[in-house]
Amino acid sequence: MNKYLLLLLLPSLVMARDFPEKHYQEQWCKGEVEHVLPDRARVDCLTDEYAIEFDFADKADQALGQALRYSAATNKKPGIVLIVEKEKDYRYVLKLYNTLQHHSLKIKVWVIRP
């Protein structure tokens, strides 16, 4: 294999997931999946009560920002579904909970596993 091609493929090989994020959205969401906002951003799951961002646990920081933004755009409560594929990923869940507590943020968090 060409060494340059291998370098291009390496990030995708390292970040391989059990299932894509969309799989979890479709299995879990009890509302509208991929609700499109006026600015074309997509809320992963919009229910009567929550604007919910789905993400893998190692992207918890990004999920936090998106949940807050989607909440503001929809006038719904913010929610985050963190996908934990490996036991070591729970460290990201704990970091998120610590951040929420430190800043007194009222964001509903669900943790799911494959």
Image (tube, rainbow, N blue to C red):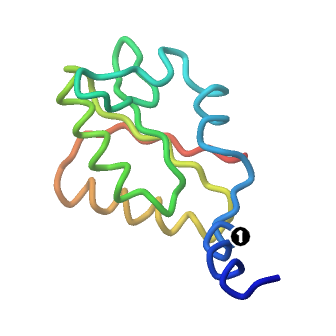
Direction from residue 37 to residue 22 in the image, left or right: right
Three-letter code, disc 1: Leu
**Residue depicted at 55% across the width and 63% down the height:** 90
Q: From this view, report whether residue 20 is shown above or below residue 75.
A: below
Direction from residue 55 to residue 47 in the image, left or right: left
Q: From this view, report whether residue 79 is shown above or below residue 64.
A: above
**Residue depicted at 55% across the width and 45% down the height:** 111
Residue 30 falls in which quadrant of the image?
top right
Q: Residues within 10 Å of mark 1 (few under 14, many from 20)?
A: few
Direction from residue 109 to residue 101 in the image, left or right: left
Direction from residue 104 to residue 67 in the image, left or right: right
**Residue depicted at 48% across the width and 40% down the height:** 54
Q: From this view, report whether residue 83 is shown above or below residue 41.
A: below
Q: Nearer the viewer, residue 29 or 103?
A: 29
Q: x, y (%) of residue 77? A: 27, 27
Residue 67 falls in which quadrant of the image?
top left
Q: Which quadrant is the N terminus positioned in? A: bottom right
Q: Which residue is identified by label 1?
A: 13
Q: From this view, report whether residue 97 is shown above or below residue 75.
A: below
Q: x, y (%) of residue 96? A: 37, 59
Residue lying at the far top in this picture: please name it: 48
Q: x, y (%) of residue 112? A: 61, 43
Label 1 SS: helix
**Residue depicted at 18% across the width and 50% down the height:** 104
